[in-house]
Structures are given as structure tokens and as C-alpha cells.
Image (cartoon, rainbow, N blue to C red):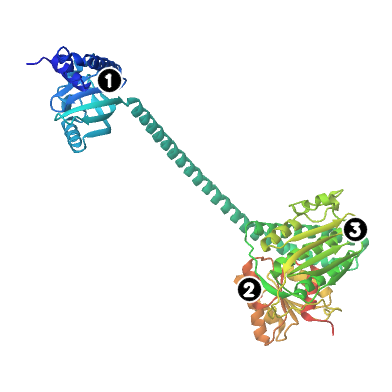
Amino acid sequence: MPRPSEEQHDALTGLLGLGSHSARKSHYPELIARLEELETERNRYKWLFEHAVHGIFQANLKDGLRAANPALAWMLGYGSPQDCLERLTDLGRHLFAGGADELAAIRRQLQREGGLFGYETRLVRKDGSHVDVLMNLLQKPDEDGLVEGFVADITERILAQQRLQTLNDELEQRVLERTRELEALNAQLREARDAAEAANLSKDKYLAAASHDLLQPLNAARLLVSTLRERALPASEKQLVERTHQALEGAEDLLADLLDISKLDQSAIKPDLDTYHLDEVLGPLASEFQGVAEAAGLELRTRIPRLNITTDFRLLTRILRNFLSNACRYTERGRILLGARRRGDRLKLEVWDSGRGIPEDQLEAIFLEFNQLDVGRASERKGVGLGLAIVDRIASMLEYRVEVRSQVGRGSVFSIEVPLTGALPPERPNVEARPVTGDPLPGQRLLVVDNEPGILESMSALLGQWGCQVQTATDLEGAVAVLDDRAPDLMLVDYHLDHGQLGCDVIRQLRQRFARSIPAVIITADRSDQCRRDLLNLGVPLLNKPVKPGKLRAVISQLIGPAG
């Protein structure tokens, strides 16, 4: 029986491809030179075999290892290749971690394809631990079950992959945790935003409610002071009345501007575009500011071409009213011009003044909130600096371009471009385009309906001073009673009356009662879109409280017509 050492020698000789040529060396002298070369080659292969970095082995899949190099022995934790050969006689049991099943699968693969390349597996070490390897196996065609293998330790690579996977897992966990934190933060931000929006909504509702309550007594006070301003009073008393008027006017402007800024910032105002004759828009403004300009010692001129425009009447009027108001405030002498110039398919509406002018470096700053041109003392301040900020917001909403040109000491020009249209505007009742001449008010019978007794008294005093015959009521029943089957020439009606009654309904029922379209004006502190829509359907002009006496007189004069 051959010894293991002889089997190892034969396997190694076969692995190196030498066979038994050295045994026949003495019998074939002519082969000595060739055999010496082969011996040298064998020694070189032997050296490479013993000093290779990777493991090399020859094995019979049934009987175990036949040859192994030191690298494989070291890789598997054995002291020497001989020790490795003596232990690894059953490959499925002692070498492959997958056991007999894995060995059977390897055998089938080798029989089918003759080789197995890039095969990753785990080998059992002497101490029972495992080592991760990459293995190439070749089946020797001349011997059944005999294979040669080349093994590389990939433990470091596997560990690196595991570390990378761990890092990826940790990163994913961190991302997940961070995502949860961001989701929690976003939830907090949404809650904060919702709370802020709720607070803003509450603020807007409070501001609207408070403003309505403030505007009612402010309107009564304004009407009473206007009545006193038109009376002949001693100089000292007239000065007190004028100061009271200025204080009320400042409070009114501030409150109105704050309401407008709040609505614009909350996007509570939506443009309501329609087609208008240009004189429908500019005519009432000219009539309104004619008296304001005269009171300031100024001349107001107008140039209104016969054109049609598409716009939001209320918002455009708000812009032009601000331009005219500023022109009257900041022009000490000279004239103001309200006019229009055609520019292709656009129309430039302009307000010229001969005032102090605006320095070029302040032309943009005037549109900031609470910003006014330099004044020496607080008493010289006019307004609160919100008007042009409102103009800027409205122009952006309507997508209109606002321009300012100015020369210090010579005056300014404020303009806004609006789209022209060839369409004809719809018929709107109770609207007169041009300012009327003469004084049509004396002798006119006017009905005032308001649920505030103070406003009824103030309105009666002012209208009576203008020569009107005034009848007052707090609701529809009271109006029917005081009229005594005689229709008034004009009705001034509050929008919100007691017990849910609306001024629109009062106007409709009185018109039905007297079977005629009695001219009417709604006066209200309600600035909502619903109120405006109701009035558009009714075809009744709207005046917001507190009412400016000049505007009130202009509207009444337009609706009644010129004096006969």
C-alpha cells in the first residue's frame, strides 16, 4: 500500500505536469538535457507553488485533498500543508461550509461545464471558524473527480462590503431619523402657519368689525364738523372746528388705508373687470375733487377723451383718487390736471400738479409703507404714508404699470396705464358722466335711512344746511310712515340696518311702492365684495363711511341733475 507521502509526491508531480520522466532519466541518455530543463522548470513551479500568495490545491472530490500549498494551509489555520492534507479527507464535511449539498452542487457544475470560475463561498478553518474565499476550479479531463483549485481570501473585501453596508444602513437610519425630524418640524411649521393664518383671519375679522363700529361715530362726527365748517363762526371757533376736521380726516384716512392694506395683503380683494366709458370713471372724480382743489386755492382741469376702457372701476378709482388727493395736499399754488393719453392699445391716465416736486432718489421710496417726503415738523405731515403703498399693490394686482415723473420745484406727474377696448359698456342706471353745473340741492326732498340716531342727526344738519328738506327713518316701516305716500327726490340708505334688514331691500320696496325708479345712494362701512355685488345688481352708487361731504354733495348733484 503506498504511503501518504508517496501519494502527495505523485499528486504534486502530476500537478506540475512532470509524470515519471525523472525515473527513466538513466535509461534515456539522449533525454538528459531535456530532463534537466524540465527539472529546472519543475523547481521553479515548485517554488511558485510554495510561495504563492493565494491558495492552490489538488483534490479528489470523493477522497479529499491530494496537494496543497502553504498559503492554503495558512488560510485554513493549519500549521503545514501536510497537516492540511491529513485533516481534509472529506471535503463536504471538513472544507466547504455548505457541506455535502454544496459539494454535490460543485460536482454537477464541473461535470456540466468542466470548470467553475469566480465562485464565492466559505471554507471551514481548523478552529471551526469560516473564511470567505473566491475560488476557481478546473476538472482534470483524464481523471474522474480530480480537480485543481485556486483560492483567494476575500475576507477584507467582505468586511469592507459589510462596513459599507453598515454605513449605508446607518446613513439610511440617519436619513430616516432626519426625515422624521423634518416631518415633525414641518408639522410644527404647518401648525404655526395655520395658527398665524387663523390669527390673521381673526385679526381681519376683528379689524373689520372694529372698523365698522369706529366708522359709525366717526361718520357722524365728520358730518357734524362739516356742517359747522360751512357756517359763519367767530374766528377762534372756526379755528377749533378746522383743527377738529383735520384730526377726524387723519383718523379716517388712517383707518381706511389700514383696511385696504389688510385686504390686499390677505388677497381678499379680487379684480372685477368690466367695460366703462372713460368719462364714467374720470367724471365723478373731477366733480369730487373740484371743491377740494378750490378750497386749497388750486385750479382743477380735466381732459377726458371719448374712449372705452376695461378695468375694475372701484380699484382704478382708488388709484386715481390717491393721485388727486396727493396733488391737492402737496401743491401750494397753481393748477392740477386730470387727463388721458392714448398709447397704442393702452391708455395712460395722468395727474399733473405744480407742487414742490420729488427728488429723483426718492421716487421709489414714496411707494413704501408709512413713507412720506421729508417734512420739518410733525404738524406739517399730511396723511400717514400708506396711499402710494396701496396704489402699488392694486397696480400689481391689476397688472398695470405706474410711472412717476417729477422735477423739484416744478411739480410731478403720476400716471397709470390701462387697456383700451372697442367694446361698448353696458347700460348702467343712475350714472351721469359729467360734473353738473349750478346747485340742484336747495328744495330737494331727501330720505335718510340709518339705524344710528347720531348719523341721522348729523346727516339732517348737513343736508338741511345745503337747503334740502330731510326726512329720516331707522327702517323700512319708519320710512313709509314719514314719507306719507309722497315719494322723495332721492334716498340715502345705510346698507346694514337693524334685525338683518338690508338697505338694498328698502330701496327696492320703496321703488315698488311709488312705482318709479327713485335715485338712491347706499352709504355703508361695509367694504366687502358681497356688498359691492349687491349694489351692482341694483344699479346704485356706493359711498363708504365716513362720507366725505364734498363727494356726497357731488354724487347727490349728479343723481338729481342740474338746477331747473
Residue that sits furthest to the top in the current view: 26
Identify the residue under disc 1. Answer: 75
Crowding at dot 1, Cα within 10 Å, few <14 / some 14-19 / many 20+, comes out as: some
The amino acid sitting under disc 1 is: Met
Q: CA distance from mark 3 to mark 1?
A: 100 Å
The amino acid type, in three-letter code, at marker 3 is: Arg
Identify the element where label 1 is drawn: helix
**N-terminal label among 3 and 1:** 1
Instruction: Mark 2: give few (<14), some (14-19) or many (20+) Cα within 10 Å.
Output: few
- Secondary element under disc 3, as helix, strand or loop, is loop
Is residue 372 something one can see in this rendering?
Answer: yes
The N terminus, quarter of image: top left
The amino acid beneath tag 2 is Asp
Asked which quadrant contains residue 57, the reply is top left
Of pointers 1 and 2, the one earlier in the residue sequence: 1
Q: Quadrant of residue 169?
A: top left
Q: Is residue 497 visible?
A: no
User: Where in the figure is residue 484, as x and y percent of width and height?
Assistant: 71, 85
Above or below, 471 relative to 103: below
Of 292 and 214, nearer the camera is: 292
Instruction: Check if mark 3's residue and mark 1's residue have beta carbons within 8 Å.
Output: no
Residue 495 % position (x, y)? 66, 71
Real-space Cα separation, disc 3 to disc 2, in angstroms: 45 Å
Q: Which residue is mark 2?
A: 534
Task: Tell me the residue at 66%/57% (across/down).
Answer: 262
Nearest the viewer among 93 and 438 is: 93
Judged left or right of residue 63, residue 362 is right
